[in-house]
Image (cartoon, rainbow, N blue to C red):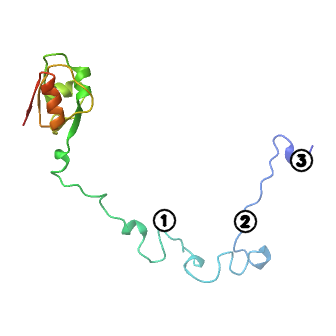
Amino acid sequence: MLQNELKGFSRKKPAKRIGRGNGSGKGTFATKGVKGQTARSGGKRRPGFEGGQTPLIRKMPKIGGFTRPDAKNKRNQVINLKDLELHFNDGDTVTKIDLHQKSLIMSVSRPVKLLSLGKISKKLTITLDFASESAKQAIEKAGGSVNTN
């Protein structure tokens, strides 16, 4: 068994001693190169320093994109006929509040649009902000009505 394999015996490499004269093997410039900022004492540079060139962090835009304040509230929430078929009974009245209570839409304040994905067989009275023509026809064909604001 070798000495470095014995339990409790660890062989630690001594730390490199820089700048202790030519006899150390790292003398003269002490592994710092010749002249320049990093060869001087205290010549450390902060993180992100790029040698005087404008750093990348300062080139980046300060704000991540721009959205018009009024555009956020105008994005429609979408509801489909198949969702109405699953969650409502024959003869029900459907409003944004009803959709929100059944977790079909995120917010009552944003507009809701009814689209015609799926089939409907229930007679519903629907009051929403928008509805596609094909969705209106499908509701009316099932005996219901659609009111848009």
Spatial separation of the CA atoms under disc 2 and disc 3: 23 Å
User: Which residue is denoted by mark 3 in the rendering?
Assistant: 3
Q: Is residue 52 left or right of residue 41?
A: left
In the rendered image, residue 91, in percent from the top left (x then y), is placed at 13, 16
- Pick whichever of labels 1 and 2 is earlier in the sequence: 2
Q: What residue type is labelled 2?
A: Lys
User: Which residue is denoted by mark 2 in the rendering?
Assistant: 16
Is the residue 133 above or below the residue 119 in the image? below
Q: In which quarter of the image is residue 132?
A: top left
In the rendered image, residue 94, in percent from the top left (x then y), is placed at 14, 25
Q: Residue at x 14, y 31 (%)?
A: 137
Residue situated in front as seen by the camera: 103 or 139: 139
- Pick whichever of labels 2 and 3 is earlier in the sequence: 3
- Pick whichever of labels 3 and 1 is earlier in the sequence: 3
Is the residue 46 above or below the residue 35 in the image? above
Q: Which residue is drawn at 76% across and 60% down?
A: 14
Spatial separation of the CA atoms under disc 1 and disc 2: 25 Å
User: Which residue is denoted by mark 1 in the rendering?
Assistant: 47
Looking at the image, can residue 103 be seen? Answer: no
Q: How crowded is mark 1: few (under 14 residues within 10 Å), some or many (20 or more)?
A: few
Count of marks, rendered view: 3
